[in-house]
């Protein structure tokens, strides 16, 4: 990267320019360019739109020292699809261990089509097969995508998402004028990055229509708000979407479903919950409630996100308070069923949502969370 910039000192190059010349993925090129900028060995142009980079006085020296990655660490994405069609799943390295996501959280891969899920998603990306992940909130859809694609950009969809949120819009600059700020869709297209449309089915179909030309054979869009500019997708650009079927207002239209050739159901991994040392009795409660949801007898069951929150709450406030909170976060129409399952499985007395009690006397001493107060009774270890 440094050598390329040093050889063209008068030029400012985009991520796409450099990726084409180096034969690496746009995500890898972007990370390398930003690393040079952080080390003061290259300059990034000011302004909005596609980031541009150029050499400075330190770039030539940086190019003299090679940073060598293991062979195959950064294969050109354009070649990956061809290469993978000639190898079997058994011959492919299986990344089964925990993966640290960009935010520092750890993701534990699961099996998908006889492959680790992160590997399966990368194969689908290499083949340019868009994926829709669907399942209840809190089951790990976003976590999986973040673990699979370190170069990910995300759009958090809702009923208020606009075309401008995807493509871009004019914003006021410090000088007082207006400049066009490209949105995540344009950035993902020009830099060849993965784009997650989270809660895509909450977004208006008219808004989502702006995405479709980038996903079909055209692989380009027109930015009508910015002089009708045509944006073409670079190799590596990929779209994955999330859908929560049980959320009010989430509608999977035929137009949206037809754009995603592969649709994967995501549920909570209860074995993982046990491996993470979450109270086995509470995991049994969650399994039981999930079965009732499958039978149509109930509308809600705690997923992995709620089970992890239970574990943290229990560590701070104690078992009874954590159980009460688990009941309280259930939808009102399901709380009685959840409370009944908790009392029968965990073996505590009738439990209600976590609620503030009467005012404490001014002289009452504050009891530490780790003491043996009432919030900690009801569980034997």
Image (tube, rainbow, N blue to C red):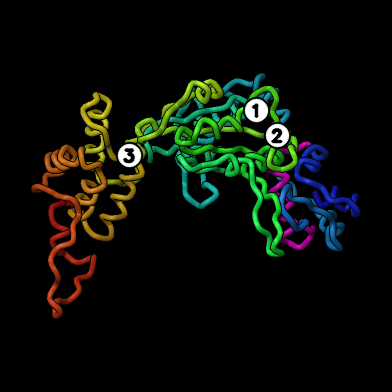
Circle nearer the N terminus (1, 2): 1
Q: Residue at 68%, 34% (x, y): give it.
A: 236
Q: Label 1: few (<14), some or many (≥20) within 10 Å?
A: some
Residue neighbourhood size for the residue with mark 2, other residues' Cα within 10 Å, grouped as few (<14), some (14–19), many (≥20):
some
Of badges 3 and 1, the one in the foreground is 1
Rendered position, 29 above or below 130: below
Compared to 58, does 260 lie above or below?
above
- Farthest residue to the left: give it: 349
Q: Which mark is residue 222?
A: 2
Q: Nearer the viewer, residue 263 or 100?
A: 263
Residue 78, image x, y percentages: 72, 29
Residue for point 24% across, 24% down: 295
Numbered disc 1: secondary structure: helix
Q: Is residue 76 visible?
A: no
Give the dominant element type of the magenta stretch: helix, strand or loop.
helix
Camera-near label (1 vs 2) is 2
What residue range appears in magenta?
23-43
Q: Quadrant of residue 300?
A: top left
Residue placed under numbered mark 3 in the picture: 303
Q: Secondary structure at mark 2?
A: strand
Give the SS element for disc 3: loop
Per the model, the C-alpha gap separating discs 2 and 3 is 40 Å
Kindly identify the residue that appears in the image at 13 percent across and 49 percent down: 351
Residue tagged 1 = 213
Distance of label 3 from label 1 (alpha carbons): 35 Å
Separation of disc 1 and disc 2 at Cα?
9 Å
Question: Which of disc 1 and disc 3 is earlier in sequence?
Answer: 1
Q: CB of mark 1 within 8 Å of CB of mark 2?
A: yes
Classify residue 206 as left or right of residue 24: left
Q: Is residue 329 magenta?
A: no
């Amino acid at each position: 990267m440094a050598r390329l910039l040093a050889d063209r000192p008068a030029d400012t190059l985009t991520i796409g320019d450099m990726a084409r010349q180096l034969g690496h993925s746009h995500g890898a090129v972007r990370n390398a360019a930003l690393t040079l900028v952080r080390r003061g060995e290259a300059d990034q142009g000011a302004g909005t739109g596609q980031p541009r980079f150029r050499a400075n006085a330190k770039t030539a020296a940086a190019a003299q020292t090679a940073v060598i990655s293991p062979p195959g660490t950064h294969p050109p994405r354009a070649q990956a699809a061809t290469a993978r069609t000639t190898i079997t799943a058994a011959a492919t390295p299986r990344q089964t261990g925990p993966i640290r996501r960009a935010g520092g959280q750890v993701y534990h891969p699961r099996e998908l089509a006889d492959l680790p899920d992160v590997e399966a998603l990368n194969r689908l990306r290499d083949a340019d097969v868009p994926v829709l992940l669907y399942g209840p909130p809190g089951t790990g859809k976003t976590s999986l995508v973040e673990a699979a694609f370190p170069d990910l950009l995300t759009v958090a969809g809702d009923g208020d998402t606009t075309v401008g949120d995807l493509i871009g819009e004019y914003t006021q600059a410090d000088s007082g004028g207006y400049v066009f700020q490209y949105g995540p869709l344009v950035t993902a297209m020009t830099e060849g990055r993965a784009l997650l449309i989270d809660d895509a089915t909450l977004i208006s179909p008219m808004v989502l229509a702006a995405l479709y030309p980038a996903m079909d054979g055209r692989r380009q869009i027109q930015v009508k708000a910015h002089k009708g500019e045509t944006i073409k997708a670079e190799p590596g650009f990929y779209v994955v979407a999330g859908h929560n079927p049980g959320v009010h207002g989430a509608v999977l239209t035929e137009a949206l479903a037809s754009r995603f050739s592969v649709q994967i159901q995501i549920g909570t991994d209860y074995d993982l919950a046990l491996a993470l040392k979450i109270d086995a009795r509470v995991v049994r409660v969650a399994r039981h409630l999930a079965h009732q949801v499958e039978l149509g007898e109930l509308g809600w069951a705690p997923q992995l996100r709620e089970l992890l929150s239970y574990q943290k709450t229990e560590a701070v406030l104690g078992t009874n308070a954590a159980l009460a909170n688990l009941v309280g976060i259930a939808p009102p129409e399901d709380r009685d069923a959840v409370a009944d399952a908790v009392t029968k499985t965990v073996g505590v007395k009738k439990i209600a949502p976590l609620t503030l009690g009467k005012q404490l006397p001014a002289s009452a001493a504050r009891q530490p969370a780790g003491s043996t107060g009432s919030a900690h009774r009801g569980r034997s270890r």
